[in-house]
Image (tube, helix red, strand yellow):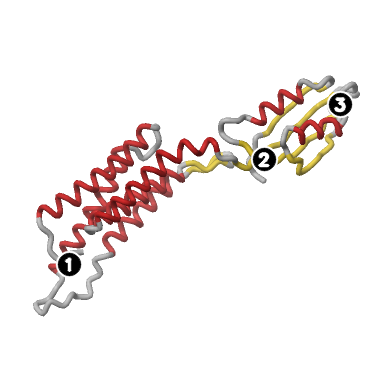
Amino acid sequence: MPQTLTTGDIALRLALAVAAGFLIGFNRSAHEHPAGLRTTLLVCVAAAVAMIQANILLVTTQNQEGHTLTLDLMRLPLGILTGVGFIGGGAILRQDGLVQGVTTAATLWLVTVIGLCFGGGQNGLGAAATVIGFITLWALKWAEPLMLRSRHGTLTIETSGEGPDEAAIETLVQGAGFTIDVRTILEQAEPMKSRCRLRLHYTVSREHDRPRELLEQVSSLHGVASVEWDDSNLP
């Protein structure tokens, strides 16, 4: 960082921080995600201001011989990072085995670091981080639905006396691309009826609802009284 800053230097750094916060925040707001335009813009500008303040104080903490005193000015921007870490932690929610808000927390962390880069005069590094962040949030979002994800689920089947046997059901399930991890034979709820539970493992993309297709195939078998699916992602 240069020891002296002109008004033009400060204006340029703030303008770049505003532009970066706006670019990333606009993407978040367009997809109706938390931490939208105003939040990311404010976080980025706040980080830049903290770094600019640390830069300005470098001059005031020098003695007459030009030697810098032991005052650690970097604690100011580091405190900003710590504070944003708490904000990001509050954005992460876990419910029914599903974790949400991790991308929001990572976005806040990114715009904070970008703001620190611009505030410290590292304009090239800040611009590169902005471009990478925007590509990650925008371009990769279109690729995510095509990525295969590992999932687990439980299939419970109740059959009548004329229903398919366990071997026929397992053949159908495996033919649909599911791997059977655990087989459980349940107590008969009614005479002449049997129930079994299969713990399944499978891969799926967001654009392909494989469990629903499996339920339709199993339900179409003669003698199947009911079919239940528990979409739990816990292994």
- Label 1, on which residue? 58
Residue 173 in picture, x, y percent from top left: 76, 33
Q: Is residue 210 left or right of residue 43?
A: right
- Callout 3 secondary element: loop
The mark nearer the N terminus, 2 or 1, is 1
The mark nearer the N terminus, 3 or 1, is 1
- Label 3, on which residue? 164
Label 1 amino acid? Answer: Leu
- Callout 2 secondary element: strand
Q: For the residues marked 2 and 3, what is the alpha-carbon distance in whole angstroms?
A: 24 Å
Q: Is residue 81 left or right of residue 234?
A: left
- Label 2, on which residue? 152
Residue 48 in picture, x, y percent from top left: 24, 53
Where is 64 relative to 229, above or below?
below
Label 2 amino acid? Answer: His
Q: Is residue 2 left or right of residue 109?
A: left
Q: For the residues marked 2 and 1, what is the alpha-carbon distance in whole angstroms?
A: 56 Å
The residue at 32%/54% (across/down) is: 113
